[in-house]
Image (tube, helix red, strand yellow):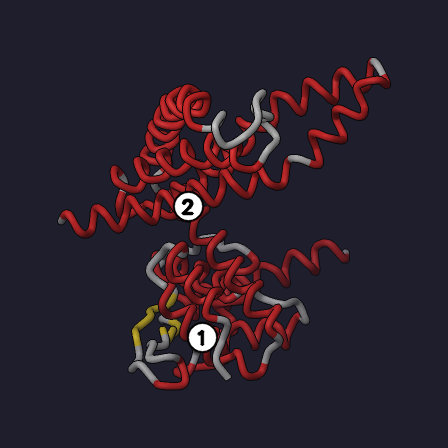
Amino acid sequence: MAWQPIGQFELLVLLATMQLGEGAYGVSIARAIEDAGGQPTALASVYRALQRLEAKGLVCTRLGEPTPERGGRAKRFAEITAAGRRQAVQTQRALQRLGLAHQT
Amino acid sequence: MRPPRLATWLLLTFGSGPDVEVIAGDLSEQYAERPRSWYWRQVAYAIVIGAVQHLRQHWALALRAIWIGSAVMGIASVVTANLAYWILPPVLPAPISPSSFPVLLLLLGVPAMAAGAAIARLHRPHAAPFAMAFAMIAVQFELLPRLVFLIRNSIQHERFLPYLRGYVAGMPPVIAIVVTGVLLGALCGRATFARVR
């Protein structure tokens, strides 16, 4: 799949999903982004970004089992795809190159 | 600890998109560790973000809904304005002051409810985001022309300033009546449609 530009927040969600592995879901992704950047994150923004990333084939999501502590509601787990992994690496490289170009 | 029921109800009723239930679950899970204000903030974000996303995806239908809502609200306003002179004089001393709450309820609340119900009935899967968008436009339509007029006049003549202050002070009830009316109407319209089906 060709490299496609993604937004800054989408990249953060993609990287957090990659870091968290199989257990990534809305709360854990939002917390990972908050821990990394210190900015409070809206859960709805995380799910919106996941929808966009899924449409681009960079992550896949599935619904888990409903649990009582969630009021009988299911979690939506996210997992990065091979294309998503490539995209994250390529975007990071592009950002690094641009950063170095800016410094010189 | 149980999360605020009103906030959860608002999210499940006015939230749109495929992840509303999942977000409600995430919020319930996190509620014990976070302040109450965090819960309300997340609910507000979820409703607004879901509505904006929905409106961007279905903008043509949204324009139609706003057009239909405006037409219904216009017709209902004429009908209620005429009815007000039949119904209200026995209750209120004449002349009827447009700033009194029962008059505002009848002249703004009833047309707003009719518009919300029409939008919800004709756009059932999109009822909440379309009704919210219409409420925002209806509020501006009701308030902005006179507000602009008074601001322009107040800049030119100081004697208009008290009118402007009075008008601004009266804006919150108007906003509350229009927004609540449209959303209540949308809820009624959606419920009626579901029963008919």
Looking at the image, is mark 2 or mark 1 nearer the viewer?
A: 2
Task: Determine which residue is flagged by label 2.
Answer: B183
Q: Position of residue A38 (x, y in %)?
A: 68, 71
Mark 2 residue element:
helix
* Left or right: A8, with B15 as reference point: right
Q: Position of residue B95 (x, y in %)?
A: 58, 20
| Front residue of B44 and B54 | B44
Q: Give the amino acid at mark 1.
A: Asp
Residue at 30% of width from left, 42% of height from top?
B120
Q: Position of residue B107 (x, y in %)?
A: 47, 29
Mark 1 residue element:
helix
Q: Are marks 2 and 1 on the same chain?
A: yes
| Front residue of B94 and B184 | B94
Task: Determine which residue is flagged by label 1.
Answer: B26
The local crowd at label 2, few if under 14, some if 14 to 19, many if 20 or more residues have their Cα within 10 Å, is many
Question: Residue B13's image quarter?
Answer: bottom left
Q: CA distance from mark 2 to mark 1?
A: 26 Å
Question: Residue B160's image quarter?
Answer: top right
Whether A30 is drawn above or below B130: the answer is: below
Whether A88 is drawn above or below A27: the answer is: above
Question: Residue B69's image quarter?
Answer: top left
Residue at 30% of width from left, 74% of height from top?
A63
Q: What's the chain of the residue with tag 2? A: B
Whether the residues at callouts 2 and 1 have beta carbons within 8 Å, the answer is no
Question: Can the viewer see residue B66?
Answer: yes
Along the polypeptide, which appears first: circle 2 or circle 1? 1
* Left or right: B153, with B78 as reference point: right
Question: Can the viewer see residue A83?
Answer: no
Give the mark count: 2
Residue at 44% of width from left, 43% of height from top?
B132
| Front residue of B162 and B116 | B162
